[in-house]
Amino acid sequence: MIIYNVTCSVDPSVSEEWLQWMREIHIPDVMECGIFKEAQINKVLSEKDGGITYAIQYSCESMKDLHHYQVNFAPQLQKKHSQKYWDKVLAFRTLMEVIQEY
């Protein structure tokens, strides 16, 4: 299992609106691609630099599936996010492989 983690530092002035948009529009759009099995929104409890930080995690079966998403869907979805929240949200992405679940 691969976890695609998107960590977002959100300006407090748009945090409520951004969270609603993620819940109602962006994450459903990502899930509609048919690549990810599940998604979750996590709030990072240690805040710094005045922003509010969230980690959105998407799970898929393989790196091949993730690559398919990154090539065929991610550019358009990320562009839509950037156009809406330009300098109010800073995002970075990390990949993790699940070794074992308990």
Image: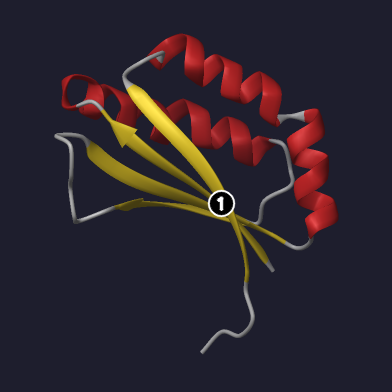
The answer to whether residue 68 is left or right of residue 94 is right
Q: Which amino acid does label 1 sit on?
A: Thr
Outermost residue, front side: 49
Q: How is the image coloured?
A: secondary structure
Residue 53 rendering spot, x and y as whole percentages: 28, 43
Q: Which residue is drawn at 81% across and 30% down?
A: 72
Residue denoted by label 1: 94
The answer to whether residue 61 is left or right of residue 57 is right
For the residue labelled by badge 1, is the local secondary structure a helix, a strand or a loop?
Answer: strand
Q: How crowded is mark 1: few (under 14 residues within 10 Å), some or many (20 or more)?
A: few
Q: Residue at x 32, y 26 (%)?
A: 18
Outermost residue, top side: 83
Taking 88 as reference, is 37 above or below it?
Answer: below
Residue 78 rendering spot, x and y as whole percentages: 58, 24
Residue 86 rendering spot, x and y as whole percentages: 41, 13
**Which picture quadrant has residue 14?**
top left
Q: Nearer the viewer, residue 37 or 66?
A: 66
Number of numbered discs? 1
Residue 9 rendering spot, x and y as whole percentages: 32, 36
Q: Which residue is drawn at 29% across and 31% down?
A: 10
